[in-house]
Image: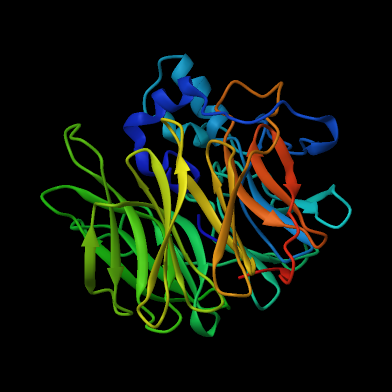
Amino acid sequence: MRGNPFRTGPTRLGLICLGWILLAGCVVGRAAARDDVFRGRQTNTGPEHYASWFGDSDGHVFYFGLSPFWQASARCQKAGGRDCALADLEQPGDHLIGRFDLEHARFLDSLVVRPLDPKARSSVWDVLVHSNGRIYYTTGWDEFGSVRRDGSDVRHYAGAGAGLNELWEGPEGEIYVTRYCGSHRGAPDESGAVAVFGPDGQHRRELPFKKEDGASICPKSVAVDPHTRDIWVNSDVIRPSGGPTGYETFRLSSTGQVLERFASPSVDFLSFDAAGRGWFAENTGGRFVVRIASPDGSVRRLDLGAHGPIDVVQDIKHFGRVTLLATWGLTVYLVRELPDGKFETAALRPPRPTHCPPSPVLGYTAVLAPRGEIYESVNCGIMVVRATDIPATKGSRLGSKPR
């Protein structure tokens, strides 16, 4: 998972850039063909229209959060409002997880994990398909919970606290979650943390960050090295009194000690594959470079090429020999490992959707379907687009189950 504010919000550009992003739009790609764009029904019983966000896949169904974040933020910006990153909280609505059938290319009914509740004004942000078969999800300001894949046995976990954002399944099935802001215990010198939960939803430990000269460390993406159990996070660094928003990457020990910290190169997103290799999407000099660090200490760097002025890698998913990196700018980078150990790359541009709500059209998560098609969740209402089929390579085998 993974991979918004907060990863599902303004990501590394920080909250101060929200207005710029809303105006710019960040869209590249070809015109949409009707059979490549799939629109889901709006079923929220509240007043807001939802859009697709970050997701995960079990190889057969694509699950993704549904939220009005960008649409609400756009309305707030247009009205000259303040704190527009919090506009999602203005209206209550159902907490929903979108579902798309990858085998038959059709939407399934959304999972209702919390019916409309005046006390719950956030929405589903990130989702994680866990190895135990459950779907775990965060809502930022409201509950942390899970549900079976068929929508039954919804569980809300008491005592999780607010600010939970991106999810990662670590060793022994533990669930690592970034806490973007605040302190679980209410400590005034803490802001942001990595929280660790058991598969039963019990809060096992909290690894908080300390404020630095009033600046808040606000972690977003998280990934755990399966060999060393080191915890990698990237984070906004928000300074008081309108100071510039920084962005840094941290490597923590399993007990939360800072082992490494750097601001350059900027790491948009990070992940580990089934072989224990770390994938770090670096964004520097207007180019995307993916750094692949193997457990034996060897490192490879793949230059994915130049990108637009407002673009970041939003998610990384692994499917056997294939890894997909999805960007805000609706580009999906395909990296495939060949039988000889070399890598080949391709930049895929899904169709550009039209008739979208007045908000940025942003790509979020790309997944691989059983027959080789690539689908991406797109913030244009409830939408999934088909990028392209994977080009055939002699001697390669493509798995369709993530991680």
Could you tell me which quadrant the N terminus lies in?
bottom right
Colour scheme shown = rainbow
Q: From the top left corner, tell me how far across and down residue 338 is, in percent.
A: 62, 69
Front residue of 198 and 221: 221
Decide if residue 301 is in sight here: yes
* Number of marks: 0
**Residue at point 22%, 72% (across, down):** 259
Q: Residue furthest top?
A: 79
Q: In terms of image quadrants, where is residue 269?
A: bottom left
Q: Is residue 84 left or right of residue 146?
A: left
Front residue of 370 and 186: 370
Q: Identify whether 270 is placed above or below 225.
A: above
Decide if residue 39 is in sight here: no
Q: From the top left corner, tell me how far across and down residue 201 is, in percent.
A: 54, 73
Q: From the top left corner, tell me how far across and down residue 398 is, in percent.
A: 72, 68
Could you tell me which quadrant the C terminus lies in?
bottom right
Q: From the top left corner, tell me how far across and down residue 400 is, in percent.
A: 73, 67
Front residue of 267 and 9: 267
Q: In terms of image quadrants, where is residue 184?
A: bottom left
**Residue at point 68%, 56% (across, down):** 367
Q: Is residue 76 left or right of residue 374?
A: left
Q: Identify whether 164 is placed above or below 356.
A: below
Q: Is residue 187 left or right of residue 179?
A: left
